[in-house]
Image (cartoon, helix red, strand yellow):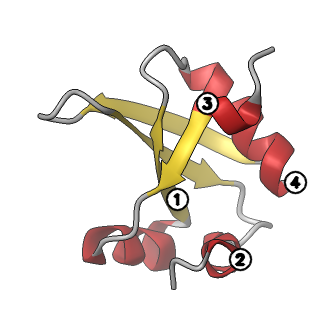
Amino acid sequence: MKDPHKVLLYPQATEKVVKLIESENKLVFIVANDASKSDVKRAVETLFEVRVNNVKVEITPDGRKRAYVRLAPEFMADEIAAKLGMI
């Protein structure tokens, strides 16, 4: 298993991300380019002690990898975002 701190590089905090946190219970992270969806899921579940429903990954125009992480309904993305200082 990869080190969770090396999989998740940093959270992204934009207006769009704040809307996703509030409306869809999602968090957005910039992740390591060699990280798979399962690596991202395990890292989020390990670091934040939550359950993840699904992970979607995209490559940004500047070549970084962005992961959209939807949490299970019993966990609140805004609580995690507050701990991270995003909102």
Q: Which residue is mark 3?
A: 7
Residue type at mark 4 is Glu
Residue type at mark 3 is Val
Task: For marks 4 and 3, give the CA distance.
Answer: 16 Å
Residue type at mark 2 is Lys
Query: What kind of element bears circle 2?
Result: helix
Are the residues at dot 4 and dot 3 in contact (C-beta closer than 8 Å)? no
Furthest residue to the left? 61
Are the residues at dot 2 and dot 1 in contact (C-beta closer than 8 Å)? no
Q: Which residue is mark 1?
A: 27
Q: Residue at x 76, y 26 (%)?
A: 3
* Sequence-wise first label, 3 or 2: 3
* Above-or-below relation of 53 to 40: below
Q: Residue at x 64, y 31 (%)?
A: 6
Query: Which dot marks residue 49?
Result: 4
Query: What kind of element bears circle 3?
Result: helix
Number of the front mark, 1 or 3:
3
Task: For marks 3 and 2, give the CA distance.
Answer: 19 Å
- Image coordinates for residue 44, horizontal then vertical, percent: 71, 44
* Sequence-wise first label, 4 or 3: 3
Query: Which dot marks residue 83?
Result: 2
